[in-house]
Amino acid sequence: MSKFSKAFKAALGILTMAGAQAHGCNVQSRPFGTLSSGEPVRAYTISSGRIEVTVLDFGGILHEIRTPDRDGRIKNVVRNLATLSDYERNPSFSRIIGRFAGRIGNGGFTLDGRRYELAARPDGVISHGGPGGFGSRLWTGRPVDCGVDLALASKDGENGFPGNLRVEAAFRIDGADLHIDYRAVTDKPTVVNLTHHAFFNLSGAPDVHDHELTINAGRWLATDARRVPTGETPAVRGALDLRGGRKVGEAANAADPAIQASNGLDHTFVLDDRHAASLRDAASGRVLEVFTSEPGIVVFSANSWNGSLRDADGRPLLKGGGLALETQHFPNSPNIPAFPTTVVRPGSPLHTTTIFRFRVDAGREGLQGP
């Protein structure tokens, strides 16, 4: 077993959603609009009394997560877009990413001795599974107790990936926790890497530079000039050492070559613990804890936002306006045998879980540890 995966195989059993869900939830469904294809989109709003989450069946978009601050004031803590057409034009914004999150280099990969050419760019890179990825698709939605189940079929050969794949994403609320549970089954060996690309902003301020970020990772994935992982996992240092907590703006604007190459935070970290990350906003008292069965997390500080897009409240989306915490396997894993495997085979389904836990710190002089 890979050195990266031992702890996470055990963590999968700890984090599974097989247990009973909390009662007292409310799930409502409503029309959200119509895609350019003419297909109707529905929004599912799940409420527990402590948190309210709105999920779209288009791409599994997290349109809202509403939580209280220390004074009980409710605010949406994920950045969203103003219209459904804006979501259509921005296929990685706040949604499920698949069939393979992150970048794969070399134009494709070899599995069981067979070469698979992917729908890559001219530089040989395929990003987030290529065009028409899972976030651009209309899923089948079904409301359930305390949540919604989304399902999608991906055909053998889509963007070059083998296997007819059925994917399920279960969104559940348990108290103030949001669980996202992914399952995937295939009829032939393939590679799969799923994540969610929600952008968090706990304060409602134009940016998250004053948020304190902690990542429980002692190593990160080095990349080449195309930002494809090389297989090297250097120790974190400087702005990338987030184990003790650091302001997002301090890290994202650091005079560090590893940061400047991405114009901010856009890095994959090798997790040391299933408690992957903490994000804290001292002004509101809101705290987000991230737990996962995955071996890695990509931290992205919205480096390309320039105000050309607006959210549902009409506010421009500016650089640093949100922070994505994308739990996942490592990008380019199909080409790096030392990385934890992303291979899924018939009879051995994929199953991963991530928990976003929201809480409030009552103190006003600063945030304390969990």
Image (spheres, helix red, strand yellow):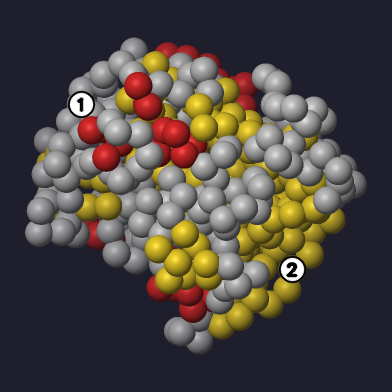
Secondary structure, mark 2, is strand
Indicate the quadrant containing the C terminus: top left, top right, bottom left or bottom right: top right
259 relative to 11, above or below: below
Residue 29, numbered label? 2
Q: Residue at x 65, y 76 (%)?
A: 32
User: How far from the left and from the top, in percent, is residue 17?
Assistant: 66, 34
Q: Is residue 65 visible?
A: yes
Indicate the quadrant containing the N terminus: top left, top right, bottom left or bottom right: top left
Q: Nearer the viewer, residue 272 or 342?
A: 272
User: How far from the left and from the top, in percent, is residue 322?
Assistant: 52, 50
Left or right of 256 on screen, residue 13 = right
Q: Is residue 328 visible?
A: no
246 relative to 84, above or below: above
Residue 231, numbered label? 1
Task: Examine the image and state in which quarter residue 61 appears.
Answer: bottom right
Left or right of 120 on screen, residue 311 = right
Whole-angstrom CA distance, mark 1 to mark 2, is: 44 Å
Q: Residue at x 40, y 63 (%)?
A: 306
Q: Amino acid at mark 1?
A: Gly
